[in-house]
Image (tube, rainbow, N blue to C red):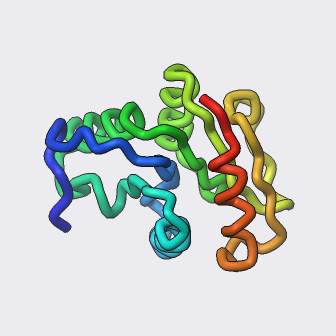
């Protein structure tokens, strides 16, 4: 994967997609979600695509922090969350970013994350992106911050 070097791009994206890269499901789901959003005009920073995953942990951290800072909003995929996702959501909250949590209706969001997110977008079947993506786009565009 090519990826960017830390600090190379200050391009503002509509959203930063916060989702683990340590789960096979997320690795397959994240690009599917990103593609559906981009087809509808939402520009995305998808770390597994846009951050140099072959870099050192410090480089990955710096690139992801820079991408969060330069994104207008954050979309948190609430499935298979890791401590890293919590860090990304915490940074986003501290920066005053609007945060949308995308979750399955049977998946609880932890107490700390629940109070940091701006909006929960709950779906019955998270894998059926096309069944809800238009409503998700409306939610993302409607958020202020």
Q: Residue at x 48, y 38 (%)?
A: 72
Question: Horizontal and vertical percent for residue 92?
Answer: 52, 30
Would you place residue 8 above or below residue 51 in this image? Answer: above
Would you place residue 49 above or below residue 51 in this image? Answer: below
Q: Residue at x 74, y 78 (%)?
A: 131
Q: Is residue 128 left or right of residue 37?
A: right
Residue 22, picture quadrant: bottom left
Residue 57, picture quadrant: top left
Q: Residue at x 77, y 74 (%)?
A: 125
Image quadrant holding the C terminus, namely top right
Question: Horizontal and vertical percent for residue 10?
Answer: 25, 38
**Which of 7/113 is in front?**
7
Question: Horizontal and vertical percent for residue 47?
Answer: 36, 54
Q: Is residue 49 left or right of residue 105?
A: left
Q: Is residue 40 left or right of residue 140?
A: left
Q: Residue at x 16, y 64 (%)?
A: 2
**Which of 78/100 is in front?**
100
Q: Is residue 27 left or right of residue 49?
A: right
Image quadrant holding the N terminus, namely bottom left
Question: Horizontal and vertical percent for residue 12?
Answer: 35, 42
Q: How many marks?
A: 0
Residue 123, picture quadrant: bottom right
């Amino acid at each position: 994967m090519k990826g960017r070097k830390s600090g190379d791009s200050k391009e503002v994206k509509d959203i930063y997609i916060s989702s683990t890269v340590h789960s096979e499901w997320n690795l397959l789901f994240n690009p599917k979600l990103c593609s559906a959003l981009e087809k509808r005009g939402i520009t995305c920073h998808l770390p597994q695509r846009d951050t140099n995953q072959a870099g050192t942990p410090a480089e990955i951290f710096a690139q992801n922090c820079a991408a969060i800072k330069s994104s207008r909003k954050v979309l948190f995929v609430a499935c298979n969350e890791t401590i890293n996702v919590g860090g990304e959501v915490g940074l986003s909250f501290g920066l005053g970013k609007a945060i949308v949590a995308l979750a399955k209706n049977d998946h609880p969001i932890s107490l700390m994350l629940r109070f940091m997110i701006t909006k929960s977008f709950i779906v019955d079947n998270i894998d059926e992106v096309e069944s809800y993506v238009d409503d998700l786009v409306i939610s993302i565009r409607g958020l202020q911050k």
